[in-house]
Amino acid sequence: MNYWEYFVSYYNHYHKYTTDLLLNPSWTNPFYWVLFWILVCFIMEQVLPKKMNYSNIKRKGFWLDLFYVLLYDFIFIIFGFLAVTTLVELIYLNSLKSIGVEPIKLFNIADWPVWVQIIVLFVITDFVEYVAHYCMHRFDFLWAFHKVHHAQEEIGFASSRHFHWGEYLIGKPLHYLPLSMLGYSAEQFIYVSLIIFLFEAFFTHANVKIPFGPFNYVVNNPQTHFWHHAKNYPKKFKYGVNFSSVLNIWDVLFGVYYNPKNKNPVLGVHESEVNVPKNFMGQMLYPLRHWFKKR
């Protein structure tokens, strides 16, 4: 079977899968979890003290952010983007095999207690996301994608989905390799992804101010993540600060945690990089413009 036949097969599978999801609500249904967390974070932005002094609905880019949510969490899935990312994963594995690299199963955690599997998968997934996120800032080729996410000067819960689709294609293979080495089997891990990781994505971008106190060092939240979106962090942090998805302990361990008490973040990218378009098509084409300009 060639790659096109694989894609058609994946597309048909995911099209049926997403159709079933839309018609059958369940506790493992990502569509309804997305809607639930959006509602929760929207209410939080209305009733809790604001982190930044701008309107939550009338802020810059609010409606474009909602379009990104609709695009990535609904339209892309319905129209087969999962088939594309699965195909990329297959090409990635075949590329490794072509140079003699076979996936190695270091551990088979399928025999471990389910709760242990879930903890191990959560910690490893969070760390892999941390590394992938840092790479997005560290390497200029990847930063061209990720800068679309960081160019916003006003953010809210929906800003979590304001990013270039290329990040999906890059991030998925990076996630697959370490998890494939574990031989994991905990189907219950889907609940962790839908409850913790999905909630954190929307919550950390929400324009709310909740005091976490010493837990700022442990759990990512708007207080710490807004500094990740800031441009006025100290110059000693060359590539940015606070890269964590859920656990801030990674930033603490690697010395890039930053959360000053008497200073407010100024969101956006540095003046020398303020060239990301404000419209959707311009943002999708931005990496190409950036690379050709560099060349």
Image (cartoon, helix red, strand yellow):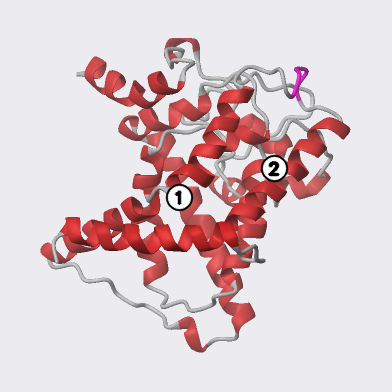
Between 7 and 249, the residue placed more toward the observer is: 7
Q: Quadrant of residue 188?
A: bottom right
Where residue 3 appears, as percent x and y from the top left, is 18, 58
Q: Residues within 10 Å of mark 2 (few under 14, many from 20)?
A: many
Q: Tell me the kind of residue under disc 2.
A: Ile
Q: Quadrant of the C terminus?
A: top left
Of circles 2 and 1, the one toward us is 1
Q: Is residue 55 above or below residue 166?
A: above
* Residue at image coords 34%, 61%: 12
Q: Which residues fall within the magenta stretch?
A: 52-56
Q: Quadrant of the N terminus?
A: bottom left
- Of 169 and 264, nearer the camera is 169
**Is 135 above or below relative to 176?**
above
Residue at the extreme front = 23
Q: Residue at x 39, y 35 (%)?
A: 138
Element assignment for label 1: helix
Q: Secondary structure at mark 2?
A: helix
Residue sitting at x 46%, y 12%: 274
Residue at mark 2: 38
Query: What mark, if any, has residue 77 been given in the picture?
Result: 1
Residue 270 in view here: yes
The reply, left or right, for residue 183 in relation to residue 26 is left
User: In terms of sequence position, does the residue under pointer 2 or pointer 1 come before the other?
Assistant: 2
Q: Which mark is residue 87?
A: none
Residue positioned 25% across, 57% down in the render: 7
